[in-house]
Image (tube, rainbow, N blue to C red):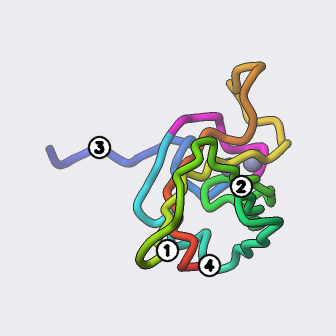
Amino acid sequence: MPGESVSTSTDTDHATAGAGVPYREVTADDYARDFTREAQALSVDDDTTVLSGSCPRCGCSFTFTYRPRAFRGPRRGPRVREIAVMCTCTTEHEGRPADEEGCGAYWNVRLEDL
Ligand SMILES: [Zn+2]
Ligand SMILES: [Zn+2]
């Protein structure tokens, strides 16, 4: 439809960061890539890994402690471990449930990429 459709919306998609990002549980393919580009993995001990970086969605920095619950016996073969990371920043994101943290973004990270 040609004619009068000039967008007057003020609510366009400019990339806001930090508190301007509403809480939403989402994931995207580039989250892992963006995160691993700068994040650091610090091995605390054999089973605990602390990931330190900034959230690809809201841009806040956070640390995520990964500690596998299950004991899986002896490791074999290549150690490719993929872990689910979620944003745990302390910034208040609009609409976040009281018992949640972060902005709701989550993604999978391969420890070997860090
Ligand atoms: Zn976030
Ligand atoms: Zn945040």
Q: Is residue 50 left or right of residue 23?
A: right
Q: CA distance from mark 2 to mark 4?
A: 24 Å
Q: Nearer the viewer, mark 3 or mark 4?
A: 4
Q: Which region of the structure is painted magenta? A: 17-25
Q: Are marks 3 and 1 in contact (CB under 8 Å)?
A: no
Is 19 magenta? The answer is yes
**Pointer 3 or 4: first along the chain:** 3
Residue on which the image places disc 2? 17
Q: Quadrant of the N terminus?
A: top left
Q: CA distance from mark 2 to mark 3?
A: 32 Å
Q: Give the structural element (helix, strand or loop) at label 3.
A: loop
Residue flagged by tag 4: what amino acid is it?
Answer: Leu
Q: Nearer the viewer, mark 4 or mark 1?
A: 1
Q: CA distance from mark 3 to mark 4?
A: 51 Å
Q: Give the structural element (helix, strand or loop) at label 1.
A: loop
Residue on which the image places disc 1? 79
Is 60 magenta? The answer is no
Residue depicted at x 80% and y 56%: 62
The residue closer to the viewer here, 43 or 58, is 43
**Pointer 2 or 3: first along the chain:** 3
Quarter occupied by residue 47? bottom right
Q: Are marks 2 and 4 in contact (CB under 8 Å)?
A: no
Residue on which the image places disc 3? 4
The residue closer to the viewer here, 38 or 23, is 38
Mark 1, residues whose alpha carbon is within 10 Å: few (<14), some, or many (≥20)? few
